[in-house]
Amino acid sequence: MKYRLLGKSGLNVSEIGFGAWAIGGDWGNQNDKDSVTALHRAIDLGVNFIDTAAGYGNGKSEKLIASVLKDRSEKVFVATKTPPAVGHWPPTPYCKIENRYSEKYIRNNVEERLRNLNTDCIDILQFHTWTRAWNKNPLPLFTLQKLKTEGKIRFIGVSTPEQDQNSLIDLMRNSLVDTVQVIYNIFEQEPAAEFLPVALEHNVGVIVRVAFDEGILTGKYNAESKFPPDDVRSRYFGGDRLERAVNRVQKINDVVKKTGLTLPQAALKFALSHNAVSTVIPGIRNVNQAELNTAVSDLSDLSEELILKLREHAWQRANWYKGK
């Protein structure tokens, strides 16, 4: 396992982290025993960074992580997330910041995170979503600064709203965050334009999520794949999205298979190829996934030729003028 600095935090984190959404729920049936053994195996293999959230099984993911870490001697960094109070997700431009992230609400939520993780101090507390409408008066981040001073949290982060990831750029430039979490993958390459360079310039740690684009970039789905109604993928790949994505993945695989890499290996290495990236957090729900994902760290970096070819597969899904 290779390690990278998480920006100004100074934390030396495994470049392959453990994405802990699936062990909490929302991804079909999940056995707790599988979750626990996957966490242990990942740590055995050098993972020292785990990302979770209040919303991953209403705290279940956090509690499972705590149950594993109490039996480990290694230092493992845990990043968790506080969601906004009940309302639109993601927040709209009209959401009042004082209604969604009040100081009282944040403090109560952080205390719950501390209890679930069985710790006195959270390594990284991230707001789970954001809107640029709050950038001129980011009061919740000042609340997190207070909690940092009080010793409740070590570092402050924000996770991007999917539809406006660049909304966090001002926060980075104004030194309001230690880390950011962003979607960056072979399909979603827009962060390379400004988001990642700004993070690098201001020494902000970058946590990359959705490197597999909710699984499609592993190549394991086909146009007939079905997901249970309570599985997040049933919404993400609704309508004709799955068929369209599968067709694009086949073209990517035609490029990747000539290199001797598997599609998942190439997807993770692509996310890691940008020097602003500190860690990538693929979802891991069993021992096999832990072993396959962590092994990618020890592979050679992608060639410049392959990176250039993969850049051609960026998918601007918000651009309707291009059609399907």
Image (cartoon, helix red, strand yellow):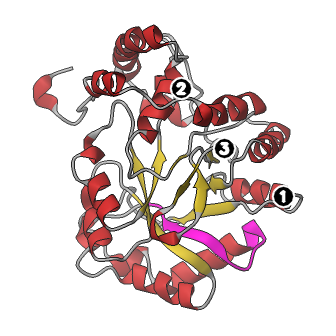
Span shown in magenta: 115-128
104 relative to 35 in the view: left or right: left
Report helix, strand or loop for mark 1. helix
Taking depth in this image into account, of 28 and 174 the one nearest to the observer is 174
Res. 230 image quadrant: top right
Q: In this figure, which residue is indicated by the disc labeled 1?
A: 67
| Tag 2 and tag 1, C-beta contact below 8 Å | no
For the question of whether residue 53 can be seen, the reply is no
Residue at 32 percent across and 36 percent down: it is: 188
Toward the left, the furthest residue is 321
Residue at horizontal 74%, vertical 67%?
116
CA separation, marks 3 and 1? 17 Å
Q: Residue 284 falls in which quadrant of the image?
A: top right
Task: Judge depth for marks 3 and 1 and give the one in front.
Answer: 1
Give the Cα distance between marks 2 and 1. 30 Å
Q: CA distance from mark 3 to mark 2?
A: 25 Å
Which is more toward the observer, 250 or 203?
203
Q: Nearer the viewer, residue 82 or 105?
A: 82
Task: Tell whether 103 sits left or right of 299.
Answer: left
Residue 221 x/y as whole percent = 52, 16
Number of marks in picture: 3
How packed is label 2: few (under 14 Cα within 10 Å), some, or many (20 or more)? many
Q: Which residue is mark 3?
A: 25
Instruction: Answer with the quarter of the image where residue 181 lies.
Output: bottom left
User: Tag 3, which secondary structure?
Assistant: loop
Magenta highlight on residue 145: no
Q: Amino acid at mark 2?
A: Gln
